[in-house]
Image (cartoon, coloured by chain):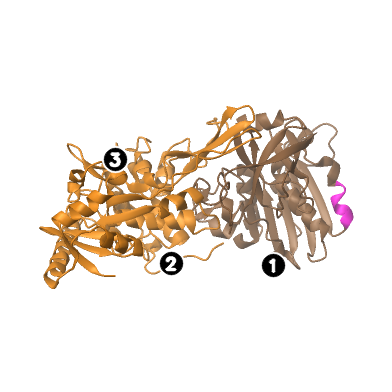
Chain colours: A brown, B orange
């Protein structure tokens, strides 16, 4: 319960500390909220461009470093164009955190499969970093990542560092063969065929564009995973963050408070999931 | 609390005391009664009209309002009005809608401060329906044309006066302090009230007898999802005007947008929004060419009706439709929500008992 609801719709100021060019279309904005804003991996914030409006993003940085919140943004439309033009030193706004966050407590003793597509690796990075910070409780962490092309591979500098922790593996693929690329090719679902994950003792976290979420889910079901093992990152169209404004519903669930990562078993029967 | 009988002169005085710019009551036009501010007590002679043409929602959730200012040089906005106001003649369906909005705006993890201030600052003098429109169907959705909760004072117009029932302390105080003759309602007067109420229920049931679905807060008919072709048939008549959502007493979707007030001074504004519009999922930066989450009109129509009859009971334990029939009157495409529910009934999905789902 928020005891002081006044201002629940207003952003608090946040300094833009750094802008990282990740790929030709993706940048990461590192912001420092003036008041501490602690979040759990998978919770989202509303990032405000003052006077222009706000848009929802799940931080890609570790929840253990809340003083430097990284927000990774794909240039995809009017708002994201404007965020890409931002320069360090600018004051932005933050509101949140909202949503439930990843159910990390449920992962004790489990195998964790993380499947990312394109910029969808951003929220999953917060999960990966949170799990890497305390690997003991989980059995293993397997990361599958797919991107359109080599240039668009996100956080490429970190890919090799994640498996160094042991019991972590990372595989990535790009959609089509490219000169100089010796890795796997094909969409990310090709990495899931016969995937070496214990069907009876695992959870899967998926984030990516709509079409990727859809086909990854169907592939996982074909591979013998149950709907209740699958969490989908339905990061879209959240506005108020409090289950009031109505726009982010899937059936009776509001993604802003019941998600944005939501168990597929809860939503599979509703027609507007994908 | 006591149930009183107040004669016409007393009612005129009681309601006259409330007259002023902060009193809202049905005001007659050529064809309809509108909820408006009333200046004189003669305006209050319209309690016998059917429910007002527009819902009381806007008095608690204005169509557009500032939710605050931000930025280095932003000055504080004028605070929301919190002085006492009165609604006279709100109906049982309106009170039921407020109960629903209370659940949404006040009972979740966050409370909406502006809504709460307006809610607490509004005295509610409700009135039994003694007439109804052709579109009224409260009895189909578990309602009654008279209130049993949610009011400060409820009035039942009899021939020469009203049975007046206070349900709150402030309502009781108002009756006592108005300097009017309040006698305890007699057996005959209560019997007359029962007769009027039963007759009104019978009339509503008769005018809705062609509909055979049963819905209330605890049980719902269950509707087919958007895969059913009947949604497309109804959507063919929808012109996406959003009138149904604007006039609906429970629809509460809103859109937040920012505007520039000056250098380093910004304001965030909340306006009503409509899930029927293709622009519904727009975000900062306005409408762009990306597909919304529900690009097809029929799936937006289905989502609205399913929210009322299926999702709301799961979310709040309350039906999202109070049967006021205003959307039926307002629809430019002549879509009648009663017919939609009738046609889309799906026995396999019915929820015969309290089917509130566990939270995710």
**Residue visible at 25% across and 64% down in the picture:** B165
**Badge 1 vs badge 2, beta-carbon distance below 8 Å:** no
Q: Position of residue A9 (x, y in %)?
A: 57, 45
Name the spot of residue A178 as percent of width and height, x first: 79, 33
Relative vertical location of residue B90 with respect to residue A236 in this rendering, above or below: below
Name the residue that disc number 3 marks: B330
Q: Are marks 3 and 1 in contact (CB under 8 Å)?
A: no
Q: Secondary structure at mark 3?
A: helix
Point out the stretch of residues depicted in magenta. A160-165
Among numbered discs 3 and 2, the one appearing first in the sequence? 3
Q: Can residue B327 be seen at all in this image of the molecule?
A: no
Q: Quadrant of the N terminus of chain B?
A: bottom left
Give the residue at mark 1: A200
**Dot 3 falls on which chain?**
B
Q: Chain of mark 1?
A: A
Nearer the observer: mark 3 or 1; the answer is 3
In the displayed structure image, the side of residue A207 where residue B234 appears, left or right: left
Residue B297: which numbered mark, if any? Answer: none
Q: Residue B355 got which mark? A: 2
**Circle 1: element type:** loop
């Amino acid at each position: 319960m928020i005891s002081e609801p006044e201002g629940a719709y207003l952003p608090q100021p946040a300094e833009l500390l750094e802008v990282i060019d990740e790929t030709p279309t993706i940048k990461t904005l590192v912001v420092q909220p003036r008041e501490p804003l602690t979040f759990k991996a998978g919770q989202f914030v509303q990032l405000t461009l003052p006077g222009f409006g706000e848009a929802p993003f799940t931080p890609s940085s570790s929840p253990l470093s809340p003083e430097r919140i990284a927000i990774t943004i794909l240039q995809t439309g009017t708002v994201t164009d404007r965020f890409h033009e931002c320069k360090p030193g600018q004051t932005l706004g933050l509101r949140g955190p909202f949503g439930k966050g990843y159910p990390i407590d449920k992962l004790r003793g489990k195998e964790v499969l993380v499947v990312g597509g394109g910029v969808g690796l951003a929220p999953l990075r917060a999960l990966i970093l949170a799990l890497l910070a305390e690997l003991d409780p989980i059995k293993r962490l397997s990361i599958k990542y797919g991107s359109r092309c080599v240039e668009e591979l996100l956080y490429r500098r970190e890919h090799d560092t994640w498996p160094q922790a042991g019991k972590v593996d990372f595989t990535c693929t790009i959609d089509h063969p490219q000169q100089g690329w010796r890795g796997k090719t094909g969409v990310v679902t090709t990495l899931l065929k016969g995937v070496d994950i214990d069907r009876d003792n695992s959870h899967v976290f998926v984030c990516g564009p709509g079409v990727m979420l859809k086909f990854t889910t169907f592939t996982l079901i074909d591979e013998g995973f149950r709907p209740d093992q699958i969490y989908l990152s339905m990061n879209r169209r959240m506005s108020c963050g409090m289950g009031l404004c109505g726009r982010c519903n899937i059936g009776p669930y509001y993604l802003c408070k019941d998600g944005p990562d939501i168990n597929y078993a809860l939503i599979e029967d509703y027609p507007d999931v994908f | 609390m006591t149930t009183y009988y107040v004669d016409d002169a007393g009612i005129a005085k009681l309601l006259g005391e409330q007259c002023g710019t902060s009193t809202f009551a049905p005001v007659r036009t050529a064809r309809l009664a509108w909820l408006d501010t009333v200046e004189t007590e003669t305006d209050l002679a319209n309690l016998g009209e059917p429910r007002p043409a527009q819902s009381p929602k806007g008095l608690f959730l204005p169509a557009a309002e500032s939710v605050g200012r931000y930025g280095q040089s932003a000055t504080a906005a004028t605070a929301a009005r919190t002085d006492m106001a009165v609604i006279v003649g709100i109906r049982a369906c309106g009170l039921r809608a407020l109960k629903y909005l209370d659940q949404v705006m006040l009972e979740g993890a966050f409370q909406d401060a502006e809504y709460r201030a307006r809610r607490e600052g509004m005295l509610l003098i409700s009135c039994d329906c003694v007439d109804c429109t052709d579109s009224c169907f409260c009895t189909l959705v578990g309602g009654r044309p008279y209130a049993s909760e949610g009011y400060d004072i409820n009035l039942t117009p009899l021939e020469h006066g009203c049975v007046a029932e206070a349900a709150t302390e402030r309502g009781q105080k108002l009756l006592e302090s108005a300097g009017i003759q309040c006698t305890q309602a007699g057996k005959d007067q209560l019997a007359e009230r029962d007769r009027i109420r039963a007759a009104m229920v019978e009339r509503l049931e008769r005018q809705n007898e062609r509909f055979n679905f049963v819905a209330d807060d605890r049980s719902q008919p269950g509707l087919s999802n958007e895969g059913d072709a009947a949604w497309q048939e109804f959507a063919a008549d929808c012109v996406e005007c959003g009138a149904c959502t604007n006039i609906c007493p429970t629809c509460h979707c809103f859109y937040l947008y920012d505007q520039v007030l000056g250098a380093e001074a910004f304001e965030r504004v909340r306006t009503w929004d409509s899930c029927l519009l293709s622009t519904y999922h727009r975000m900062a930066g306005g409408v762009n060419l990306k597909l919304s989450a529900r690009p097809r009109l029929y799936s937006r129509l289905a989502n609205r009706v399913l929210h009322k009859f299926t999702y709301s009971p799961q979310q709040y334990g309350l039906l999202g439709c109070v049967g006021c029939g205003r959307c039926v009157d307002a629809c430019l495409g002549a879509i009648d929500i009663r017919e939609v529910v009738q046609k889309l009934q799906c026995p396999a999905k019915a929820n015969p008992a309290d089917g509130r789902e566990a939270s995710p």
